[in-house]
Every structure is written in structure tokens, then in C-alpha cells.
Amino acid sequence: MNYPSRISDNHLAIFLFHGVTLSVDCAVRNYTRKHIERDYFVTVLRRLKQVGTPVSMNDILTHRELGIPLPPRPFAVTFDDGFRNNLSVAAPVLVDEHVPATFYISTDFVERNRMSWIDRIEFAVEQCVCAELQLPWGQRQFRGDEERRVFLNEIRQIVKNDLMIDGEQLATDIQAQLGVAITYSSSHPLDQKLDWSEVRTLAAEPLFTVGGHGHSHVILDSLGTQDLEYEIETGMRLLKEKAAVHGPHYSYPEGMPNCYSARVIEALKRRGVRCCPSAVDGVNDSTADLFHLKRVMVV
């Protein structure tokens, strides 16, 4: 991907990462490249720096609120979810390259080293080369690596666009049908999350900012009012109590247009959030709303 081409004089590019790893030894897991290799990460950062100027999400916030100019051809680096390799692998590279970054943390992932619903499904499918399953939308089967990837792509597409489907319950059902132990956490490097001491370490680095990303990583706009308030409040309370993080930064879990709305934005604003990028692909002009910022996924 030609990521430097997304940087320009008249726009702000915000790049979205999830994980940076030393190696991946799986047949199917990480086929989406949610976790990229360290050497590739270094290459991407250096190419971005050749054409643009790294800025922090704090710089973006003060630019929009106080009118402080951004440098020429600005770009920002962000991470979602809270994987342990953000600290162990990505952070040293960012420090060496003098690139600021913001890490958006899902607090239940930290509290219990919890996996997302799609990672639970990938974890189970990795262990089964062939299977036939009954899903809410029909019977599906896979045989071999390519069909497993097609199967996982279908699940991603359907569940992320149908807020009536409970991803966690679907993950449990699929694990049971595959005869795999019902798994909510894993010690595999692709699943390991930060613990609270590691979140504090990230937050203490002057180049870095830590923000919220929900508590359980559920799609915020799928929740009723009471559950929405709980999801936001719990995540922000834990960040404050356990990592002394109480800043204005947040990002929407999943982050596509159907995942947030005006009522979600208002709920975030009531708790002091002032900047919340989405995961919608694109770059931003100087008038972009801080709650509708687009990002570019790096894979």
C-alpha cells in the first residue's frame, strides 16, 4: 500500500494500527494483517516521515480548539485495542523514530486479558482445517486455508453490519460446534493484552498518549441508553483509577458509520471526551469535526 500518498499539504492523515509483532506462526490467524511485522512497521514510519511531519492527537486537538497551526503535511499514528506488543515491539520503534502515538485502550481487554469476539473465532478456526457449521444466517462449511479465510471474511462482514447479532455469543457457538474449548483469553502473542502497569508505562512516555476505546469493545450504537452509559463510564473510570489516564481522547470500537451516532457522541462529550476518530477510511481537511475524523488502516 502506498501510505505516503495519503499525506498532503491540505489534509491531515491519521494512520490506524492494531499490533506490531516479531513473527506470526499461524496458518489462518492474522490473515487480515491486524498485526504487522516490526521491520515493515519501521519501513512504513520512515516512508511517512520522508513526506510528512508526525504530530500527536493532542496537537490535532489544540489545532482545532485553539487555532494553533499544524506543521506542513501532518500525519498522526494511532493504535486501537491495547495489545501488549504495542509496548514491547511498537513503542521502542516509535521512540527511536521520534514519532508520537496515541493508544486507545479497551479496558476489559486489560482487566482480563480478554480476546475480542472475532479473535475468539479466529483462534477456534485456526485449530480446525475442515468443518461444517450452522450459523444464524445459514449453514456454512470450510475445507483448507483459503475457505477458512473466506468463512472468516463473511463473518466479519455480516456481524459488523448487523447490530442484532451478538458477536460474543456467536464466538461461543462456533467454538462449541468446532469442539474447541470455550476460550475468552489466550497466552498466544497475537492475543496478549497490556496489563495496567504496562498501560501506565505507555502513558508515562512523553511521546505517547493513552485514550479510551470502550470497556468491552462492544459497538456503542448497538447499546441501549443504560448500557451505553455503563460501557463508557466503566472504561473511563478504570483508565483513571488504574492508569491515571483522564484525558480527552477516545476512539469508537469498530468505528464504522453504523457503530456510532449523535447520541453516542453526546454521551462521550458529557464525560469530557473532546476528540474521537472513527475507523472510516480517509483523510481530513482543516474543518473536520473531531468526532468524525477518518483514519487510514495500515496492514
Image (spheres, rainbow, N blue to C red):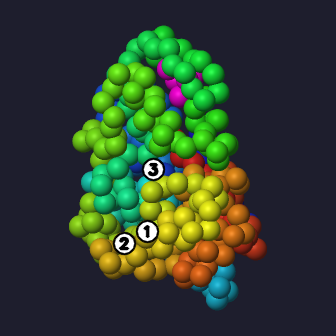
| Residue drawn at 33 percent across, 26 percent down | 180
Q: Secondary structure at mark 1?
A: helix
| Dot placed on the residue nearer the N-terminal end, 1 or 3 | 3
Examine the image and state in which quarter residue 205 appears.
Answer: bottom left
- Circles 1 and 2 in contact, beta carbons < 8 Å: yes
The spot of residue 189 in percent (x, y) is 29, 41
Query: Residue shown at 70%/64% (left/top)?
Result: 261
Estimate the x, y position of residue 167 in percent, counting from the top left.
Answer: 52, 42
Residue 67 to residue 281: above or below: below
Identify which amino acid the numbered label 3 is placed on. His
User: Can residue 148 be found in the magenta stretch?
Assistant: yes
Q: Is 287 rendered above or below residue 78?
A: below
Kindly identify which residue carries mark 2.
Answer: 238
Residue 258 visible in the displayed image: yes
Q: Which span is picked out in magenta?
A: 146-152
The label on residue 235 is 1
Q: Residues within 10 Å of mark 2 (few under 14, many from 20)?
A: many
